[in-house]
Image (tube, rainbow, N blue to C red):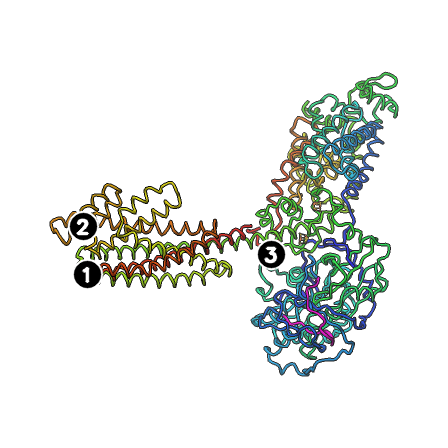
Amino acid sequence: MAFWIASSPHNHIQKSTSSLMRLVILAAFPGVLAQWYFFGWGNLIHICIAMITAILCEFIILSLRDKKISEQLFDGSALLTALLIGVCLPALAPWWISVIGTIFAIAIAKHLYGGLGHNPFNPAMAGYVMLLISFPLQMTTWQPPLSLMEMELNFSNTLTTIFTGFTLDGYSVEQLRTTIDGVTMATPLDTLKTSITMGLTITEATQSAVFGEHFALGWEWINLAFLLGGLYLISQKAIAWQTPVSFLFSLFLCSFIAYSINPDSSASTMFHWFSGATMLGAFFILTDPVTGATSVKGRVVIGLLAGLLVYLIRAFGGYPDGVAFAVLLCNMSAPLIDQYTRPRTYGHSKESS
Amino acid sequence: MESIINRINQQKFWSFHGGVHPPEQKAITNQKPIKTLSLPDQLIIPLQQHIGRQGDLLVKVGDHVLKGQPLTQSANPMAVPIHAPTSGKVADIKHSVIAHPSGFTELCIFLEVDHQDTWVKRTPCNDITRLSNQEIIQKIADAGIAGMGGAGFPTHIKVNTKPDINFLIINAAECEPYITADDLLMCEHSESIVDGIKILDQLLSPAFILIGIEDNKPKAIDALKKATAEIEKIHVCVLPTKYPTGGEKQLIQLLTGKEIKSGNLPIKEGIIMQNVATCFAISEAVIHDTPLLQRVVTVTGQALEKPQNVWALLGTPIHYLLNQCGFDNKGMEKTPVIMGGPMMGFSLPTDTVPVVKTTNCILAPSYKEMPSAFEGSSAEVECIRCGQCADVCPTNLLPQELQWSAKAKDYPQLKKLNLSDCIDCGACAYVCPSHIPLVQYYRVAKAEIRQQQQQEIKAEKAKARFEARKQRLEKEKIARELKHKKAAEARKAAMNKSTPEAAEAKSAVAAALARVKAKKAASQKSSENTASTQASEETTIQDNKKAQVAAAIARAKAKKQEKIAPQESSSSAENESVKDDKKAKIAAAVAKAKAKKEQNKAAESEPEQAKASTSADKKANAIAKAKAKALAKKTASNNSDDSSKEQKAPLDKEAKKAAAIAKAKAKAKAKALAKKDKASDVKNNSQDDSQISNDNDNQDISQTGTPDKVKDSSDKDTKKAAIIAKAKAKAKALAKKQLASESASEESQMIEQQKGAK
Ligand code: SF4
Ligand code: SF4
């Protein structure tokens, strides 16, 4: 009797790449929900647009590249990219922003570099940065939290705003962004930056309504939700813990040093942790295995570097939030870091390894 | 070392990097006792069941053998004998598929079991302390014990070492899922195992004996602790369950905190590791004089109705074991049957594969419990660099980078990434979410690297051989030239004073030289033949043929020369007329050169004949050709030596020149002939045949013709000259022979090299 021949190991942990991706998408849910709660339907609509675009785009490119469509189309990586893009965009950005961003992310940042596993840059962040540079106006029309808005923004209003630029009642995005007291709103990070450049101290700047009673109205809860999701991922061993831990530590350290030196013009450590895209970046973007470092040491180094970069960009750069740029810069340095953080192989002395 | 023991006493251990926790599945079999099976009807016993060499057969087809009777033996220390596991008749000795990942066939003895189970005479030994170490080692060697944990390294070699051993580690970890063979052996035969450990203790006298066992075998731990309670030296070390704790290097690291340097054996650190089953076999062999005939095999998996540990005779075909345990593969499209565990075992090609000394488990999984065993590499997708493989690698390698380099066949990079340190444990492939069969890639790459290395070594050897040969040929050439020079000088000296005495002396020298040359050629030829060991018999025959042909041609040439000598001018004219024919031309040129040389001799030894045509010939030759002129001048010079002494000085010079030219020509001719011989050998064998017969005829004539001519001159000197000519011709023939054989061996070597390069 002849038997079926296979190669060892015959057993497998029975995890797969797609299930890993699905898990990450699942873990992002609390954050997305928090976002919905504080900012309305905008981001959810963008996520949907981005996902549809991503699937279509992926399908076309996979068929052009003669790949196994059925397996790779739903491996979840494209959906995850779309999700991240959708989460990052300003809620009331026009629809074509997410379409262009997603196409760029999938077609250029991912597939032109060889597809999943070969892309040097995180596709979502590459797409986001491309949008930020190409469409600065649309990309900075941040919507204030619902509680601060003059007008009620329901689902249909959001939908028409995204697709036509006006609500059902004919208000424009600009009008929507104007709060009760007639001030155009920006993100807390934005506000902080402009206030500090205007010569205000942190305490004065944080008087602004966007900061709420803690660090940043709405944002703090979103960040907390992403942190929760991230912790879940770590507990599931879906992502490596070293990157987020070292990233948060590094960001904490930088802001702490700056804060202790100059508390008047430096935001608090917790403000840095719980505003902007800090937690999203820490647990969902930096941990993207494809574009990160592979060794344990390498991951730690990447995290430290990213924390430093985020702080530097936030404090001194031209953009209010630096997570996207920091991630791309880390992606660039990942191969080099990998090269120099090879672990010592068993039985090899330090020098020879 | 004390600190190590202190830590061990506190049951604190080190740890190794990575590791995985695959489902253990040991409960399937670890509650049932080891079952003794009824005898199968046929055993298939491979001659080689271990690392090393196979022994020489002691039995032949039709022999009746008794249980425990050795079937092979060998003086080689790396050979381990095998024994008849039960009594019966040797039905056949032929190649059969053996337990090997690649489904190799090996020579196997097919034993027809007679169901009598008659033992050979045994001499049990009750007091091992009376035995010397050498006796014990001999007993272990005779019992055919090879490491029963995995690789199957001959045990008697492992235990036969210098006495400087710090740790004897008994590997009882059995970290592979499913396998419980060692577990049950420890539960049921802990006393025997401890006896075996005592024997090892006596042999190696280690400072400490550590038994490494995973904490998922509580019964075995109890049994061992009880059995070793009063031996202080032995420490039972209970380790946390993690795969691959049972790996040699991992276990050493866990117990002693030491790392074995890459490429070294543990013995260098004063550590020796033995498997528990090996200990049991040692005690059986030394105390009960029972060779290794059977072993515990875990037959498990959900495709079986009655999975169980069994005592399986070596050579039991797998289908027998599967049947005994209720193997049911109905409704299964594919049936993987794995020898060894799910992590490192290999799937078997057929069910006739026999149990061997290293077989610890037969695993027949169902699809539900182990889908990946059925899928092969079909589920593979792109690596996402998640690094999980690197996290679990016990050797701390970077499996994903290894995988890329292996796919790209970047062998230098693989070496840099220390592929050779990979222990094939499979942990990386086990966790890879992209289902990449990493270990498979490494295996292929390792095999290719090994092949490449072997080829490099081969090429290196061939190169060295070639260089040596070139050097030798160079040396010979120089020696030859030196000899030629000497001969030429001698000739010159003789020419300068061609008195009868001088001529006599010269001819004597020439004859001696010819003899020496002939001898040397002969000896060289023989040495050439013995030296070129690779040359097959065929080429030797070819060499002989070639040499014969060459000799025949040479003889013919010699004859021609003698004919041409007296009528040199006419022959040169003739030669010019047959220019069109290329072959004829070459032949003529050769003949001419020879003739000239011959003429020299004729001139020296036959002054009368030369004198007859002195002036006329001189002029004719001068007109005909420059070479001929030179020769004629030489003739003249010889003559003038006799007649006019005033002309001696300038003519002497010319004579020298002529001699040099003649020498060079002779050399060139020899070369050309060698080439021509080779070419004609290859191109037209049939022509060669006819040529041989012609040559033979010619030779007859020449032999009979020579004395006639000699008679004409009826001079002493002439006779001598003829003899010299013959001797030279012979020498030349021999030289050619040698050349021919050399070219043949060169050819064969080239072929060899090409083969090697391929
Ligand atoms: S576990 Fe598999 S997918 Fe992950 S890095 Fe290793 S090889 Fe790549
Ligand atoms: S098979 Fe080799 S590379 Fe993979 S985990 Fe084991 S030792 Fe490491």
Q: What kind of element bears circle 2?
A: helix
B559 left or right, relative to B261? left
The answer to whether residue A299 is left or right of residue B304 is: left
Q: Give the range drawn in magenta.
A: B80-97
Residue type (three-letter) at the residue carrying disc 3: Gly
- For the point 24% across and 53% down, the residue is B600
Instruction: Report helix, strand or loop for mark 1.
Output: helix
* Residue B319, above or below B428: below
* Point 74% across, 24% down: residue: A139
| Residue topped by disc 3 | A347
Whether the magenta-drawn stretch holds residue B90 is answered as yes
Question: Please, is residue A344 above or below residue A78 in the view?
Answer: below
Q: Which chain carries label 2?
A: B
Circle 3 packing at 10 Å, graded few (<14), some (14-19), many (20+), is some
What amino acid is labelled 1 in the image? Ala
Q: Are marks 2 and 3 on the same chain?
A: no
Q: What residue type is labelled 2?
A: Ser
Label ID, residue A232: none
Q: In this view, does B151 lie to the left or right of B697?
A: right
Query: Where, by quadrant of the figure, is residue B20 drawn?
Result: bottom right
- Distance (Cα) linking label 2 and label 3: 84 Å
Q: Residues within 10 Å of mark 1 (few under 14, many from 20)?
A: some
Q: Name the residue under label 1.
A: B502
**Alpha carbon of mark 3 to alpha carbon of mark 1: how far?**
81 Å
The mark found on residue B637 in the picture is: 2
